[in-house]
Amino acid sequence: MSGSGQGRTARVRRAAARCLVLVAVFTVSGGLLGRGGAVAAPQPTVAQVRHQVGVLRQQAEVATEQYNAARENIASLNVRLSAARTQLLARRTSVDVARSALGRVAADTYKAGDLASLSLFLSDNPDGYVATNGTLVSLGDRRADAVTELLNQRRLLVAATTDLQQQQQRLVQQEHDLRQTELTVQTKLSQAEALLGQLTGRQRQQLTTTLTTEYQASLTGVGIPVPPSGKVTCKDVPTGPVDARVSSVLAYACAQLGDPYRWGASGPARFDCSGLTMMAWKQAGVSLPHNAQMQSTYGTKVPLNALRPGDLVFFYNPIGHNGIYLGSGLILHAPQTGDVVKITPLKYIGGFTTAVRL
């Protein structure tokens, strides 16, 4: 074999050896590489997932209250829209009436025109002209009044038309906001579920155990013993004497303990926070909107150190959660997605904003 041939053979062998080395490296490191050759992201810890899921679910709850507010606004706008349509029809009728009145005055004016005046003046009783001339003057006044009334009714018609258009535009905007907020809620909850899905079965059990332990510790921390079942009921909370109104509110709320949280729901078997408080106070004949922020504007403001059973307690800024005060520093509320209607120490929630008494 010539020298050049031997050189080519050596180069081929060296290239083949390098290929084998590269194959081996990729085979060994395959578990460290993700799709596209990127290094796979480290598995999140249980603590990290818990924090991120908590943040997402709280954001979803705040968005839920925005969703509820949009629904309340839409209901109110529909009432206003109906009233605006009724008003517009009334204004159109008033314009038609004013136009007809002006037409009658115009006809009377024509009949009492110059020829009529001349014939009266040349008659055998000229004094009659003077008497009749008062009618001509009154016709002028009537004509002026009729024109003024028609212009006024047309102005009111334009205003009613503008109001109707504005109400329709507000309704369209609120319906758009409703759809966008609904999408926000669903996105946040889907992200939370995806994070939980990254945990193993053992990790999820660990997370559940940790949350349960912390919740029970918060109850014992305020002097409420946790029964063997782990489920605290209203019978475990010393509320003291209450009036008939508050009694009906608490009886309804306590009957919902254990019902799942469902955003936008107000019963009969699923609730969000403001849906629960709305339905509870409905039992006492109080009509509340399905929105925590709106509910906080009802009744009388109560300081934290003066709370009584039945008072509504609100959290976060802007307000995004609420519950019903039971006594002993505890509230009954529908917490968030993944949880159930339960009794919780007020301080355990954190972020107290205000309270009202209805």
Image: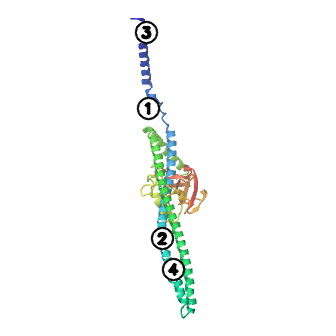
Q: What number is the disc on residue 92?
A: 2
Which label's residue is closer to the chain start, 1 or 3? 3
The number of callouts visible is 4
Residue under pointer 4? 105
> Horizontal and vertical percent for residue 132?
55, 88
Q: In front of the other: label 2 or label 4?
A: 4
> Horizontal and vertical percent for residue 10?
42, 11
108 or 43, nearer to the observer: 108
Q: Classify 35 as above or below 211.
A: above
Mark 2 and 4 residues: CB-CB less than 8 Å, in contact? Answer: no
Mark 3 and 2 residues: CB-CB less than 8 Å, in contact? Answer: no
Residue under pointer 1? 35
Q: What's the residue type where badge 1 is placed?
A: Arg
Which label's residue is closer to the chain start, 1 or 4? 1
Mark 1 and 3 residues: CB-CB less than 8 Å, in contact? Answer: no
State the quadrant of the C terminus: bottom right
Which label's residue is closer to the chain start, 4 or 3? 3
Q: What's the residue type where badge 3 is placed?
A: Gly
Q: Secondary structure at mark 3?
A: helix
Label 3 environment density (alpha carbons within 10 Å; few <14, some 14–19, many ≥20): few
Which label's residue is closer to the chain start, 3 or 2? 3
181 or 329, nearer to the observer: 181
Q: What's the residue type where badge 4 is placed?
A: Val
Q: Secondary structure at mark 2?
A: helix
Residue under pointer 3? 7
